[in-house]
């Protein structure tokens, strides 16, 4: 801690309360209470579910799938979210954004972002706003850049729409899941994404904890005695291991660890690189020169990988993959396992770490829950079961669905639904990383230790280091190292207006408050004078401020209005075209119709086709009007000729 001479205007102190985050959910519109859903925002796939009458309904998308790719493609006409977006990836990789969860809440100069950039075919830039990451694409013909929150909001919007259509009324509230070790910025950015999509985020819950809730509901975990549960969550892009205890329906996360860069995508990449080498051997061509070809190969590799979970061989075939060359290869499960074995083995190191953190021996673990699509890989299951000395793993719930089921149950509980089987179900969570302040000599003074149950509030007294110091400057860090230079700076906080006093005399009460969503607020107050008003929090990680959020929410609402208008127009056009087709069919097939009537109806229909062709921008009302005219005219022709009259 050191002196700071700045005298900025103070904010209202809220010591002891639950102060709002500088740009928290308060930006979300006040909305009428509607149904609350659970949303699992995965790195590669996302899903939405709702809990009704104590049972969880998973909501399928228009492609009959209960998981939707977390992918947004920008085309010259529209934005495509989910499956249509994923299809676009092979055609226009630069404008198809995926794995956005890796970018959320991060700054451009973050080393992990720099690593990821190499694998993204789309363009990632540094925004002028606090060094945040932005994605640059061509959206309906215009070059545009979006914050990761905005892209994630497009995925959330899609899920919200699906749930609204399923429930028959708009969805306004949600519980969203996040990886256990998401930091404050990533969590806040996720809340912001929910707000942009027009949702009130009731709570963020950790993915493994959500899975445990789902298992609790299905009575896979006996509720009377205390049980220790290890949740092994290996998804598309992230890997979480958590240790929980369950007793009388109360879950407590006692340890959480993992790797933000380990998952199915990495296994896909190993297979892609292997097959690109194979292509080089077979055809003496370097496939990696073409992003498009690599993207297409990636899509088939992902499918082959899935096949290898249930079969020992998989065929990879792509027509005209590169320079017109067709590619065919067969991959065996053994080859795949060999390519990925170091990655698979690495998961066990995290399991060991989680057990150490929880001070548990592996024999003390009662249940091992498998979560995440990648846990279907037989070698993963084999290694894990061997690690636990042959223990049977819990696979009762579909690994893709456990997390969203838990989120939906939590949403039901938070909105006051008291189903018999949900009663007494609580969830205590822990902080994934230690939090503290920098003190003299750059030493980290930890206020909240890693794995502390949340919500939590820790208060500690500090003082000045110089005589007559007028302000105090606090640097807030997260991390496990003794020196702050090895940890991560979260933000700074300035307390001005200290009364002149010798060093070490003023008592500065610093409070770290972590709320249910694992979001941290730090407050400081000078005890003798109560100077807590003069408090300034500066988040150095550049989250979106209120104005920026308002702008984005407004733009998103405008886009949704335009999209709705465009959709209505397309429906009107479709309706006109289907009327024309139907009338043509009647003219051709209806035997009782007079030949002159047939000819005239066909003529009118062709005139209409020509009009549609020549008026691509016709508004919805005109299309509707034209349809009415077409039907009236054809009807009068048919009735006229059937009563032997003149050509109208
Ligand atoms: P999640 O994020 O939990 O939805 O997991 C998605 C990941 O699981 C993706 O990388 C998928 O390729 C992978 N996945 C899904 N099904 C299988 C399967 N049968 N075998 C191997 N990996 C799978």
Image (cartoon, rainbow, N blue to C red):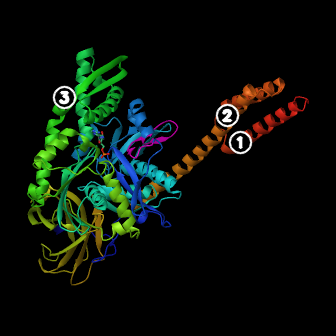
Mark 2, residue position: 615
- Give how far across and how far down residue 602 sits, in percent: 75, 26
Q: Quadrant of the C terminus?
A: top right
Instruction: Give above or below for 167 relative to 376.
Output: below
**At 68% from the left edge and 37% from the top edge, which residue is drawn?**
576
**At 57% from the left edge and 48% from the top edge, which residue is drawn?**
564
- Give how far across and how far down residue 161 sits, in percent: 49, 52
**How far separated are the C-alphas under marks 3 and 2?**
56 Å
Q: Quadrant of the N terminus?
A: bottom left
- Give how far across and how far down residue 424 sits, in percent: 30, 71
**At 81% from the left edge and 28% from the top edge, which residue is drawn?**
593
- Give how far across and how far down residue 259 sits, in percent: 20, 48
**How far separated are the C-alphas under marks 2 and 1?**
10 Å
The quarter holding residue 382 reads top left
Q: Quadrant of ligand 1?
A: top left
Which of the two labelled residues, at mark 2 and mark 1, occupies the earlier sequence position? 2
Q: Is residue 70 magenta?
A: yes
Which of the two labelled residues, at mark 3 and mark 2, occupies the earlier sequence position? 3
Mark 3, residue position: 335
**How far separated are the C-alphas under marks 1 and 3?**
60 Å
Mark 1, residue position: 622
Q: Magenta span covers which residues? A: 64-82
> Helix, strand or loop at disc 1?
helix
* Horizontal side, residue 297 vs residue 368: left or right: right
The quarter holding residue 189 reads bottom left
Viewer-nearest of discs 1 and 3? 3
* Horizontal side, residue 399 vs residue 391: left or right: right
Q: How many residues crowd around disc 2 within 10 Å: few (fewer than 14), some, or many (20 or more)?
A: few
Q: Are marks 2 and 1 in contact (CB under 8 Å)?
A: yes
The quarter holding residue 518 reads bottom left
* Horizontal side, residue 361 vs residue 454: left or right: left
Q: In this orientation, does residue 202 appear?
A: no
């Amino acid at each position: 801690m050191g002196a700071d001479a700045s005298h900025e205007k103070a904010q209202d102190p809220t010591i002891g309360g639950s102060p709002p985050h500088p740009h928290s959910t308060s930006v979300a519109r006040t909305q009428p209470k509607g149904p609350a859903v659970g949303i699992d925002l995965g790195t590669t796939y996302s899903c939405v579910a709702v809990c009704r009458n104590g049972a969880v309904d998973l909501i399928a998308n228009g492609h009959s799938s209960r998981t939707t790719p977390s992918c947004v493609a920008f085309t010259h006409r529209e934005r495509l979210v989910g499956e249509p977006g994923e299809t676009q990836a092979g055609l226009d990789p630069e404008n198809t954004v995926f794995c956005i969860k890796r970018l959320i809440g991060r700054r451009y100069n973050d080393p992990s972002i720099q690593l990821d950039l190499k694998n993204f075919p789309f363009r990632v830039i540094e925004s002028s706003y606090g060094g945040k990451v932005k994605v640059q694409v061509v959206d309906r013909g215009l070059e545009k850049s979006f914050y990761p929150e905005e892209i994630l909001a497009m995925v959330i919007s899609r899920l919200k729409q699906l749930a609204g259509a399923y429930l028959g009324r708009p969805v306004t509230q949600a519980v969203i899941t996040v990886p256990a070790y998401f930091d404050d910025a990533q969590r806040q950015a996720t809340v912001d994404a929910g707000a942009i999509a027009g949702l009130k985020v009731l709570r963020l819950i950790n993915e493994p904890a959500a899975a445990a809730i789902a298992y609790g509901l299905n009575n896979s975990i006996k509720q009377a005695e205390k049980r220790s549960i290890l949740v092994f969550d290996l998804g598309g892009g992230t890997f979480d291991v958590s240790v929980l205890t369950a007793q009388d329906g109360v879950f407590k996360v006692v340890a959480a660890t993992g790797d933000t860069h380990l998952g199915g995508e990495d296994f896909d990449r190993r297979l892609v690189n292997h097959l690109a080498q194979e292509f080089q051997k077979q055809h003496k061509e370097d496939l990696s020169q073409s992003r498009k070809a690599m993207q297409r190969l990636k899509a088939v590799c992902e499918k082959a990988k899935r096949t290898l979970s249930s079969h020992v061989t998989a065929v990879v075939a792509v027509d005209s993959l590169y320079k017109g060359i067709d590619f065919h290869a067969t991959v065996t499960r053994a080859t795949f396992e060999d390519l990925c074995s170091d990655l698979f083995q690495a998961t066990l190191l995290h399991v060991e770490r989680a057990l150490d953190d929880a001070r548990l021996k592996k024999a003390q673990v009662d249940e091992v829950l498998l979560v995440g699509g990648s846990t279907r890989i037989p070698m993963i299951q084999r290694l894990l079961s061997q690690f636990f000395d042959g223990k049977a793993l819990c696979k009762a719930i579909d690994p893709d669905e456990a997390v969203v089921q838990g989120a939906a149950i939590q949403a039901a509980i938070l909105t006051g639904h008291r189903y018999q089987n949900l009663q007494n179900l609580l969830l205590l969570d822990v902080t994934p990383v230690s939090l503290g302040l920098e003190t003299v000599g750059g030493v980290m003074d930890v206020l909240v230790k890693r794995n502390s149950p949340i919500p939590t509030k820790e208060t500690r007294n500090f003082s000045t280091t110089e005589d007559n110091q007028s302000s105090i400057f606090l640097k807030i860090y997260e991390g496990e190292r003794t020196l702050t230079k090895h940890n991560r700076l979260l933000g700074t906080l300035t307390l001005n207006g200290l009364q002149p006093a010798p060093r070490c005399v003023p008592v500065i009460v610093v409070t770290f408050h972590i709320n249910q969503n694992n979001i941290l607020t730090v407050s400081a107050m000078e005890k003798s004078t109560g100077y807590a008003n003069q408090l300034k929090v500066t988040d150095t990680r550049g989250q979106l401020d209120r104005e920026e959020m308002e702008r984005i929410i407004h733009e998103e609402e405008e886009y949704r209005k335009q999209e709705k208008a465009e959709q209505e127009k397309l429906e009107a056009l479709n309706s006109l075209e289907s009327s024309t087709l139907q009338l043509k069919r009647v003219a051709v097939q209806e035997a009782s119709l007079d030949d002159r009537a047939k000819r005239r109806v066909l003529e009118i229909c062709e005139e209409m086709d020509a009009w549609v062709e020549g008026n691509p921008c016709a508004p919805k009302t005109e299309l509707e009007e034209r349809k009415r005219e077409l039907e009236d005219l054809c009807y009068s022709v048919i009735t006229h000729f059937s009563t032997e009259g003149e050509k109208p």
